[in-house]
């Protein structure tokens, strides 16, 4: 208890710094997943991508980041167990943040594909099980989370397969694809606006002072969908058939119409990414904050303060503005084979899956979800060549990241315990 | 780059296959100027064209090898890997035969009897037309990829393949004409020369056959 009293503020500021740095890292590295596809498909320039990402990542984190944040904060280990020793929870959470940050640093320096989400979950489980007791971990919940790591790429894959098949049937495999693209693409635009806002509304926006009923939510979502369609149709109107480009590749003009759609799916993807990945940075911070602010009381019911979500969103935005453009550029250059007609299907499917996971509080890997979505398009025979070895690296990343996160967290946990007593 | 999204996309073999076919066609089309030089018995010029043909064939060969290297195990593609490797091999065989024609005609300094010139030219041209149609078919690969090897685009390519068959039939009838003419003239020509003229005629027909085979292979690929 005394530790919380005399070192509380130091610990809190330490966590804020680590949390912000973590969010910064998420922004610098992971945002490329959301934006790289759009840049690679030629739908956005890097500058536009960074701007869109900054706005929508922040919005996603701020408006829809709460659920996953509370899972990280108190879903994996039960804070009530720490009523006698709240400082252990603080050490554990700080240790988890440190572990995740350092592991990600090591991984990115070595070029290993690891997931932020898996690292932080591994870290929290690790300090909970080894530092406190095996029973401190809500294994049932951890099981659901791990299951969601399998189901989320699967779900995104099935969704993107269906989306891309519908595009083939309605637009690409017909005799006048350009005309049909202009006719049907607005419906997909509506889908983007509607799904993203509906999920966000339903999950609740009371923390920003919006309390909507289901009816109101649907109404506003339809409105947002329609606004998206209006903007989209205006942009679409400017696109005319480019006979010259079509001579070489008959679908060049059609792809340009899809590129407009991809601007919106990129927004959706950024929003979804922000809503899920922000928790990796600020979930531990939220836990530490609630202990220290209540003077050592474990208040498991307290809502996440808005400033924490704000900090997370701002951290992501800073990271991507400072560093994201480099990563986006690299990714964009590497995936030019993903044309807008495929990129949109992958992004919309992945974005929808991720935002649904965010609403249900499941911390999932955006990268793996997007990989699943791309494979879905591949199964609809949409992509020239997919390197299946990637799936193996994903599994390896699981197998290595979880124990690594856990081990480092345990290490830091005991170090902090030793330092602060 | 550590991001799985980055390593997810392998390089596409389809555009390189189109490039390869363009080179093959160029190689075949050089035969026209080569044959004209042979007709004129201008062996210096013929040698230059033969060099061009050999160079183009070599470029096509390198492209073929590159494409095959780009198709390692563990790639997930909309069409089977064997189909593509087969197809690129067939494309390449067209260029090989063109090279053989140029090499033997120059090597033996073959003289084509004047009365045969116009029929010979027509025959060669019709064979080249088959190749250029085959090229047109292969140039649809990126469009086929775009549509997921389905729907309207497949029908369009199938129509092109039927045109290819018709053109090959025309080449066959030209081949018969040229043989007929050679038969009527063969008493006046040295027997060894005649033998090789028949061979060259055979090979020009073979160029058309191989071009047709490319179309058929693609058709088979679409049927799966």
Image (cartoon, coloured by chain):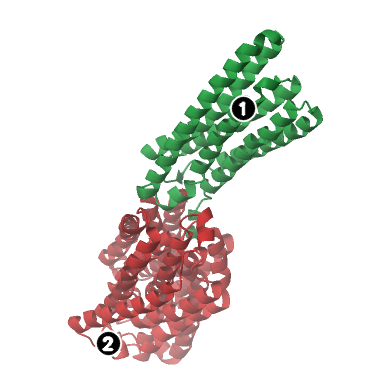
Give chain A's shade.
red
Quick one: label 2, few (<14), some, or many (20+) residues within 10 Å? few
- Quarter of the image with the C terminus of chain A is bottom left
Between circles 1 and 2, the one closer to the viewer is 1
Give the residue at mark 1: B97
Q: Is residue B129 left or right of residue A60?
A: right
Q: Mark 1 lies on which chain?
A: B
Q: Position of residue A374 (x, y in %)?
A: 41, 57
Proximity of marks 1 and 2: CB atoms separated by less than 8 Å: no
* Residue positioned 62% across, 12% down in the render: B184
Across the whole image, how many numbered discs are drawn on residues?
2
Along the line of sight, the residue nearer the viewer: B189 or A2? B189
Nearer the observer, A150 or A387 = A387
Q: In the image, which disc is placed on residue A264?
A: none
Rendered image quadrant of residue B27: top right
| Discs 1 and 2 share one subunit | no
Q: Where is residue B17 in the image (x, y as percent from the top left)?
A: 55, 43
Q: Is mark 2 on a helix, strand or loop?
A: helix
Q: Is residue A1 visible?
A: no
Of the pair B55 and A37, the residue shown nearer to us: B55
Chain B appears what colour?
A: green
Could you tell me residue A138's position as x and y percent?
Answer: 28, 68
Q: Name the residue under label 2.
A: A206
What is the C-alpha distance between the residues marked 1 and 2? 76 Å
Helix or strand or loop: what does disc 1 sit on? helix
- Which class describes the residues within 10 Å of circle 1: few (<14), some (14-19), or many (20+)? some
Q: Would residue B207 appear left or right of A388 to someone viewing this image?
A: right
Q: Residue furthest right?
A: B44
Asked if residue B3 is positioned above or below residue A310 in the image, the reply reads: above
**Residue B199 visible within the image:** yes
Label 2 marks a residue whose chain is A
Measuring 43% from the left and 66% from the top, which residue is drawn there? A257
């Amino acid at each position: 208890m005394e530790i919380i009293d005399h070192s509380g503020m130091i610990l809190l500021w330490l966590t804020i710094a680590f949390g912000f740095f973590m969010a910064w890292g998420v922004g610098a590295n992971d945002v490329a997943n959301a934006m790289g596809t759009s840049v690679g498909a030629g739908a956005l320039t890097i500058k536009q991508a960074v701007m869109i990402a900054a706005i929508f990542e922040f919005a996603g984190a701020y408006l829809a980041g709460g659920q996953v944040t509370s899972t990280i904060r108190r879903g994996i280990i039960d804070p009530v167990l720490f009523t006698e020793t709240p400082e252990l929870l603080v050490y554990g959470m700080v240790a988890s943040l440190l572990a995740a940050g350092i592991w990600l640093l090591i991984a990115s320096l070595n070029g290993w594909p690891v997931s932020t989400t898996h690292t932080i979950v591994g870290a929290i489980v690790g300090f909970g099980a080894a530092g406190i007791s095996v029973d401190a971990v809500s294994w049932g919940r951890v099981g659901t989370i791990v299951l969601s790591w399998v189901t989320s790429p699967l779900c995104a894959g099935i969704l993107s397969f269906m989306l891309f098949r519908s595009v083939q049937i309605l637009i690409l495999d017909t005799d006048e694809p350009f005309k049909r693209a202009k006719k049907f693409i607005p419906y997909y635009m509506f889908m983007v606006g509607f799904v993203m806002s509906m999920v966000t509304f339903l999950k609740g926006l009371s923390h920003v002072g919006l309390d909507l009923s289901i009816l109101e939510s649907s109404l506003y979502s339809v409105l947002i969908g329609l606004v998206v369609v209006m903007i989209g149709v205006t942009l679409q109107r400017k696109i005319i058939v480019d006979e010259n480009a079509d001579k070489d590749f008959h679908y060049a003009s059609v792809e340009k119409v899809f590129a407009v759609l991809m601007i919106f799916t990129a927004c959706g993807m950024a929003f979804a990414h922000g809503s899920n990945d922000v928790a990796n940075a600020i979930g531990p911070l939220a836990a530490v904050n609630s202990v220290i602010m209540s003077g050592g009381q474990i208040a498991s019911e307290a809502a996440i303060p808005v400033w924490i979500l704000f900090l997370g969103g701002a951290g992501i935005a800073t990271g991507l503005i400072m560093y994201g453009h480099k990563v986006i550029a690299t990714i964009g250059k590497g995936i030019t084979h993903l044309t807008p007609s495929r990129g949109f299907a992958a992004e919309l499917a992945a974005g929808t899956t991720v935002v649904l996971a965010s609403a249900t509080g499941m911390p999932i890997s955006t990268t793996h979800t997007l990989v699943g979505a791309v494979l879905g398009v591949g199964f609809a025979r949409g992509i020239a060549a997919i390197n299946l070895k990637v799936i193996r690296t994903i599994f390896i990343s699981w197998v290595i990241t979880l124990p690594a996160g856990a081990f480092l967290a345990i290490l830091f946990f005991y170090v902090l315990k030793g330092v602060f007593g | 780059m550590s991001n799985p999204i980055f390593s997810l996309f392998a390089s596409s073999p389809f555009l390189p296959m189109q490039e390869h076919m363009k080179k093959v066609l160029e190689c075949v089309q050089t035969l026209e100027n080569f044959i004209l030089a042979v007709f004129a018995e201008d062996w210096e010029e013929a040698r230059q064209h033969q060099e061009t043909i050999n160079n183009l064939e070599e470029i096509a060969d390198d492209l073929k090898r590159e494409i095959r290297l780009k198709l390692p195990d563990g790639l997930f593609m909309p069409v089977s890997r064997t189909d593509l490797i087969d197809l690129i091999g067939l494309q390449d065989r067209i260029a090989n035969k063109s090279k053989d024609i140029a090499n033997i005609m120059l090597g033996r300094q073959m003289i084509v009897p004047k009365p045969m010139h116009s029929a010979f030219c027509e025959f060669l041209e019709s064979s080249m037309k088959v190749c250029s149609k085959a090229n047109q078919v292969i140039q649809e690969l990126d469009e086929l990829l775009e549509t997921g090897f389905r729907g309207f685009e497949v029908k369009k390519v199938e129509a092109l393949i039927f045109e290819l068959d018709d053109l090959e039939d025309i080449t066959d009838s030209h081949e018969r004409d040229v043989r007929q003419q050679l038969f009527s003239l063969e008493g006046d020509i040295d027997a060894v020369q005649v033998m090789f003229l028949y061979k060259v005629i055979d090979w020009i027909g073979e160029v058309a056959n191989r071009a047709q085979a490319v179309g058929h292979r693609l058709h088979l690929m679409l049927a799966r």
